[in-house]
């Protein structure tokens, strides 16, 4: 999210978050008084699909003539469906429907006041891009199914992986005033693919929500008595559509490494921008993002929960 601001030549300031990932309003106020240039926009995120109440933040922004951008990237927010509590307070809303549906792109910019979007123009993708996307959608459906023997094999795989003393990774800080290589000028005004819109429009949202909540609950239950970890949000609010299951682990140096070696699909905010926020520094390495996608089969969930359970119970001498 920093790249577009850097591309506009904007100065970026990061405000601290509380442990539940809500903005620290007192620290935000303090930060604001130290900024020399006029502040144009503030980005506030509903992390992991757990919507926050941004009404106070909205007031704070309005008083200072700052545009509030509600980051619904982790929220099920489409042209037809808005998860409860989302898209209410932001002057603008951005969302990433491709995180919730099996499509290959799709970023959504929404404003309750449609006039705010009058000047936004987009260019349609080429036919080749459309065809490539359809191929990718078909390829993604051919996912490997897992069986009881894969689960049985985890213990010996883990023994082999943990016996190897891997070299500790190096943290590297990169300073940049221009966008990263991930940013492309050409895609700034690119409209979503037609295939992506089709997939989003024709998916059964209720089923998507049911499966995601079910998978999230399986993670909650399966990790409840596992040592060296705790769920960030053990109780899912009633209307929430979870993006992923955030799990805080105590020993990332070994456990995250082993999970990766076992090929558990797990994410972290490794490349987070450096800030003074203690929570951000802690979550960068300690907070795992585990999938609860609606397309996961029961066997895949069994394999992942089992791999996580065995890994977090496993220790090896000499490794932190
Ligand atoms: C909190 C948050 N905001 C924004 C984004 C950017 O979304 P996109 O992948 O659609 O660029 C991400 C990406 O994962 C994210 O985690």
Image (cartoon, rainbow, N blue to C red):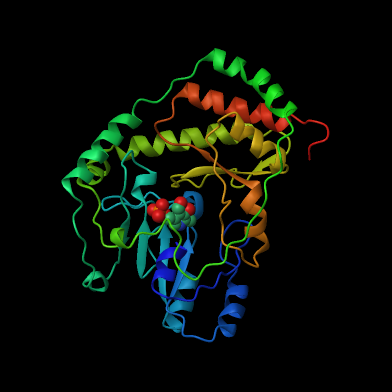
Furthest residue toward right: 318
**How many numbered discs sit on the rendered protein?**
0
Q: Looking at the image, which is closer to me, 198 or 218?
A: 198
Going by the image, does 158 lie left or right of 3? right
Residue 152: percent from the left, percent from the top? 61, 15
Q: Looking at the image, which is closer to me, 169 or 299?
A: 169
Going by the image, does 223 lie left or right of 294? right
**Residue 160 visible in the current orientation:** yes
As displayed, is residue 48 above or below residue 254? below
Furthest residue toward left: 127
Q: Looking at the image, which is closer to me, 281 or 261?
A: 261
Residue 12: percent from the left, percent from the top? 50, 73
* Location of the C terminus (image quadrant): top right
**Residue 84 visible in the current orientation:** no
* Location of the N terminus (image quadrant): bottom left
Residue 231: percent from the left, percent from the top? 63, 43
Q: Looking at the image, which is closer to me, 107 or 222?
A: 107
Question: Which of the 4 image quadrants contains residue 66?
Answer: bottom left
Q: Residue at 20% x, 39% y: name it.
A: 131
Question: Which of the 4 image quadrants contains residue 132?
Answer: top left
As displayed, is residue 172 above or below residue 260? below
Going by the image, does 173 lie left or right of 2? right
As displayed, is residue 265 above or below residue 284? above
Furthest residue toward top: 149
Going by the image, does 126 lie left or right of 223? left
Residue 15: percent from the left, percent from the top? 57, 70
Q: Quadrant of ligand 1?
A: bottom left
């Amino acid at each position: 999210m920093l790249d577009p601001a850097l591309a506009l030549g904007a100065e970026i300031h990061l405000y601290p978050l509380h442990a539940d990932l809500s903005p620290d309003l007192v620290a935000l106020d303090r930060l604001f008084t130290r900024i020399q240039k006029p502040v144009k926009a503030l980005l506030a995120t509903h992390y992991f699909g757990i919507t926050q109440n941004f009404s106070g933040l909205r007031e704070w922004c309005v008083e200072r003539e700052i545009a509030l951008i509600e980051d619904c990237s982790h929220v099920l927010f489409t042209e037809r469906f808005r998860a409860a509590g989302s898209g209410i307070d932001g002057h603008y809303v951005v969302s990433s429907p491709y995180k919730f549906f099996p499509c290959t792109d799709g970023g959504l910019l929404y404003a309750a006041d449609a006039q705010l979007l009058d000047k936004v123009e987009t260019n349609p993708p080429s036919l080749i891009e459309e065809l490539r996307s359809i191929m990718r959608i078909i390829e993604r459906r051919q996912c490997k199914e897992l069986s009881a023997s894969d689960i049985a094999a985890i213990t010996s795989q883990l023994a082999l992986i943990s016996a190897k003393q891997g070299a500790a990774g190096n943290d590297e800080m990169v300073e940049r005033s221009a966008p990263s290589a991930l940013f492309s000028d050409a895609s700034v005004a690119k409209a979503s693919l037609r295939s992506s819109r089709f997939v989003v429009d024709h998916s059964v949202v209720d089923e998507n929500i049911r499966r995601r909540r079910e998978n999230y609950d399986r993670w909650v239950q399966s990790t409840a008595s596992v040592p060296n970890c705790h769920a960030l949000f053990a109780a899912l609010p009633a209307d929430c559509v979870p993006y992923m299951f955030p799990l805080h682990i105590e020993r990332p140096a070994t456990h995250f490494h082993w999970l990766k070696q076992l090929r558990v699909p797990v994410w972290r905010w490794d490349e987070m921008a450096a800030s003074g926020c203690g929570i951000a520094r802690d979550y960068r390495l300690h907070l795992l993002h585990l999938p609860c996608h609606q397309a996961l089969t029961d066997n895949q969930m069994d394999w992942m929960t089992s791999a996580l359970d065995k890994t977090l119970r496993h220790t090896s001498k000499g490794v932190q």
